[in-house]
């Protein structure tokens, strides 16, 4: 449903309809920010990356070959923008690594630890964790956005949670 | 605690740790104010004219990791030198103005070891500036010799890398994003540093045998390997650099260690030149799909220390031992995308590692060439692709193959 609706909006946007583009942007913005946050580890940088990604979409929209694949295309763009941002910031060639440092927040040390564990997850697992828990996104929306099946999303989330649980147990044993 | 409630508790904990207190909402007005040109581009559906004020390309692949850098440094240095010279006609402004009209660049080059040409490192490339960031390349087609090519396609947002081997045929690696282009010194910081560090700047206007004038700029500058004596040839008619060489010594005698032999601007580029047609017989590694597949598996590979060649060797050794032992379970863990039965069709008596190639570029894998000796004493060579990634919470090395269709 979302996918089909996206397709319609993409066609309208291709005709220069900024309102249609705005609807697309509003719809996908939380997913863009969550994806960028999973890479950058910072909300503000993630918002910047999401907005930059939308700007790139404006430039490149007419080159999108399959409008029905708008979500995955958008996802790739924001991953690249975020990775570029990370590169520029670290001045190092970045693969899938992310900063290990986690800021202490008012949430308390346990949540900080959980956040640190999530940040050490493999990138594709970390990505679905952020998409799922960042803005409570449904499996269907995540599947549309990432261009994979709901089953794959479910598998990744299960695996991510298993790893998180394992790490948490490890911490508990240490303390 | 029951498993279900435990899971719900975990969900809650992760949501509290990851979830944002402040809702994520798109502020359309603020975004439009921030990107007025992009909005205008969308609404006008402009023709797509690419005007670039100043751009550079830096590839990040094998030899080209630094050869690309050298090209850009050469170009940039040329600009800087003009800027520092009052008596020449090639002021920076003129060159910048000339670059305004540059919509693509073509170049060839080569690297030699102390005067000897090394055939495998002859390269040529075509590049267009990125629509999103004109300081880096967007579309790029780069060829080294006759067997290695990579193509970045900005609109498809992917990079295709392909290598042909005489023994095994063509391998194609599909990778996510534009991952060979690099922005180098977009703000001129590095240029300034190189400028500060360079010695013995000299400019010379010379006439060739046909009566054509050229500007040659020489200086001792940033080293490429240990070569550090640069010479840039400028066309005073266009104000654009046309050749660059870097020598080991200041005599500038013989062939340079590294050279760009032909720099051309605004060359005709055929349509679809930045799209790679995958040959039917090619082995295609869809790297993002393979990564996603691996992320969903358990118990694969062997523990390794890092993503270096030593780890690739370790994986290949484990694979060789499994082949000799005809251990189908171990083979399933080490090389999960090949049925163990197909690997064990003939009994193996010995496996020797011939070559390990550790490439750190996105979307490609470390490669290991092994020689397998079979029971009847026949030998054959195999090319293994080794991926190192976090699996099951630890760093694991695994041999990957194309995903089945």
Image (cartoon, grey):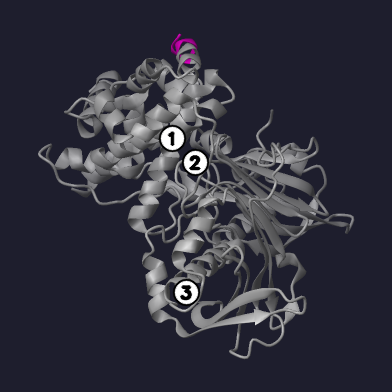
Q: Name the residue furthest top.
A: A1
Identify the residue shown where x is 66% and y is 75%.
B213
Q: CA distance from mark 1 to mark 2?
A: 8 Å
Q: Callout 2 environment at 10 Å: few (<14), some (14 to 19), or many (20+)?
A: many
Q: Secondary structure at mark 1?
A: helix
Q: Is residue B339 left or right of residue A76?
A: right
Q: Callout 1 environment at 10 Å: few (<14), some (14 to 19), or many (20+)?
A: many
Depth check, mark 3 against mark 1: the one in front is 3
Picture disc at residue B81: 3
Identify the residue shown where x is 24% and y is 45%.
A171
Q: Is residue A37 left or right of residue B298?
A: left
Q: Which residue is mark 2?
A: B131
Residue B403 point in image, percent of width and height: 65, 34
Identify the residue shown where x is 49% and y is 80%.
B221
The stretch of residues the image draws in magenta is A1-6
Q: Is residue B219 left or right of residue B322?
A: left
């Amino acid at each position: 449903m979302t996918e089909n609706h996206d397709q319609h909006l993409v066609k309208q946007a291709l005709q220069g309809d900024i309102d249609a583009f705005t609807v697309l942007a509003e719809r996908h913005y939380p997913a863009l920010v969550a994806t960028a946050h999973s890479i950058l580890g910072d909300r503000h940088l993630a918002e910047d990356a999401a907005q930059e990604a939308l700007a790139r979409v404006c430039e490149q929209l007419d080159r999108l070959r399959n409008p029905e694949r708008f979500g995955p295309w958008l996802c790739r763009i924001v991953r690249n923008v975020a990775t570029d941002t990370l590169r520029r910031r670290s001045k190092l060639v970045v693969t899938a690594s992310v900063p290990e440092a986690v800021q202490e927040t008012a949430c308390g040390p346990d949540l900080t630890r959980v956040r640190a564990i999530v940040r050490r997850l493999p990138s594709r697992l970390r990505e679905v964790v952020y998409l799922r828990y960042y803005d409570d996104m449904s499996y269907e929306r995540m599947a549309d956005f990432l261009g994979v099946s709901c089953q794959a999303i479910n598998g990744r989330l299960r695996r991510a949670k298993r790893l998180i649980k394992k790490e948490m147990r490890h911490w508990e044993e240490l303390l | 605690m029951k498993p279900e409630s435990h899971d719900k508790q975990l969900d809650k904990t992760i949501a509290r740790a990851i979830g944002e207190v402040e809702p994520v909402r798109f502020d359309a007005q603020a975004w439009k104010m921030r990107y007025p040109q992009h909005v205008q581009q969308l609404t006008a559906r402009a023709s797509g004219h690419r005007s670039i004020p100043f751009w550079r390309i830096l590839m990040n692949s094998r030899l080209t990791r630094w050869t690309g850098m050298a090209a850009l440094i050469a170009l940039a240095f040329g600009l800087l030198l003009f800027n520092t010279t009052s008596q020449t006609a090639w002021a920076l402004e003129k060159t910048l103005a000339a670059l305004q009209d540059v919509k693509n660049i073509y170049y060839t080059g080569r690297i030699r070891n102390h005067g000897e040409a090394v055939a495998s490192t002859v390269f040529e490339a075509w590049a267009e500036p990125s629509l999103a960031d004109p300081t880096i390349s967007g579309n790029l087609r780069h060829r080294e010799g006759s067997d290695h090519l990579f193509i970045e396609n900005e609109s498809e947002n992917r990079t295709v890398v392909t290598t042909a081997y005489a023994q095994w045929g063509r391998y194609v690696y599909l990778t996510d994003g534009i991952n060979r282009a690099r922005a180098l010194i977009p703000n001129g910081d590095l240029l300034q540093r190189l400028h500060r560090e360079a010695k013995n700047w000299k400019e010379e206007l010379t006439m060739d045998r046909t009566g054509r004038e050229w500007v040659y700029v020489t200086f001792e500058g940033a080293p490429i390997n240990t070569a550090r004596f640069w010479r840039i040839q400028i066309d005073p008619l266009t104000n654009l650099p046309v050749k660059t060489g870097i020598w080991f010594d200041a005599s500038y005698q013989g062939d340079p260690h590294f050279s760009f032999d032909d720099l051309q601007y605004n060359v005709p580029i055929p349509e679809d030149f930045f799209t790679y047609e995958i040959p039917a017989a090619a082995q295609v590694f869809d790297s993002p799909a393979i990564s996603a597949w691996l992320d969903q598996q358990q118990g694969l590979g062997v523990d390794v220390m890092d993503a270096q060649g030593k780890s690739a060797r370790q994986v290949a050794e484990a694979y060789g031992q499994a082949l000799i032992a005809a251990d189908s379970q171990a083979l399933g863990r080490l090389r999960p995308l090949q049925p163990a039965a197909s690997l064990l069709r003939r009994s193996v008596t010995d496996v020797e590692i011939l070559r390990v190639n550790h490439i750190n570029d996105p979307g490609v894998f470390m490669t290991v060439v092994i020689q397998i000796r079979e029971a009847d004493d026949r030998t054959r060579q195999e090319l293994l692709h080794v991926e190192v990634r976090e699996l099951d919470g630890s760093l694991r090395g695994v041999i990957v193959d194309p995903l089945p269709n």
